[in-house]
Image (cartoon, rainbow, N blue to C red):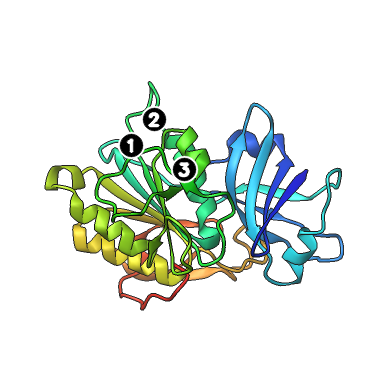
Amino acid sequence: MRQTAYPGGQYVLRVQAPKCAATALPGSFAHITCDPAVPMRRPLSIMRASAEAGWVEFLYKIVGDGLRHLGTRRPGDHLSLMGPIGKPFEPHRDRPRPLLIGGGVGIPPMIFLAERLKPDAQSEYRPLVLMGSEIPFPFRARPSAILVSGMPDGVIAGMPLLDEWAVPSRLASWSDFPGCHAGYVTDLASRWLESLDGAARDQVEIFACGPAPMLAASTALARRFGLPCQVSLEEFMACAVGGCAGCTVEVSTPDGPAMKRVCVDGPVFDAHTVFSKEVPQVPGT
């Protein structure tokens, strides 16, 4: 394993886990033992996976003792990891312009999904990734070499790795970071959607992961423009295999409201079944 530290108590963790890497999909997660002294595992979204090299990668921010212990682990240490777990994102070929919205520690699944949808000879997708954060991004943001029409003047900062994949990206923050949109990431998404004509907008599908207010705002955006939207929920988990039912959320179904387990019924859900009412948005998204 190896770890790379970033400002704001953020870490990128890479672990050799060939079985997990072979079957990981964007939106799935792993349940990790942070330290032998911490009995409860922690769920972490998978940010990248290489089936060929046998590694999986995670981004996490230190919150609480468990992840604080994980931040002290060093190369050569062994971690207990269960994964991949959960229902992944499901892009649809009739929507070849996916809009990926990530907020804070909800960024990792968007990077994984962008990698799987990156343009090449076999892919018909043209994804756009928008990310928001109030602490420094866990990468060195740079002016993107990829032009994106519909962006406000001066919004040029992007993620270099996505540029390498020919995937356009733009960043948003209230923290006055250079080249970033000064506002919510969902406001930036709205500006882009408004710039599209009807035919182009009909090719868009929204994928989002981040704080609940950001997901609610993403759903409201999808509802406003009549778009499908999938969200990956973040919940505390004990077992992560569906046994304890400690991570349930209420979801609308044709038969009425039902309680679903985020770990095995999700973490990815149809946004319109989860956020039937708008939730006020807060800074950081």
Q: Is residue 268 visible?
A: yes
Q: Residues within 10 Å of mark 3 (few under 14, many from 20)?
A: many
Give the amino acid at mark 2. Pro
Image coords of residue 21 (percent x, y): 64, 37
Whether the residues at callouts 2 and 1 have beta carbons within 8 Å, the answer is: yes
Q: In the picture shown, does residue 229 fall above or below 38? A: above
Residue 119: assigned label:
2
Sequence-wise, which precedes: disc 2 or disc 3?
3
Residue at the far bottom in the pictured view: 280
Residue shown at 37% from the left, 28% from the top: 123
Image coords of residue 279 (percent x, y): 36, 77
Q: Which residue is mark 3?
A: 113
Q: Is residue 272 visible?
A: no
Does dot 2 land on a helix, a strand or a loop? loop
Image coords of residue 154 (percent x, y): 34, 54
Circle 2 or circle 3, nearest the eye: 2
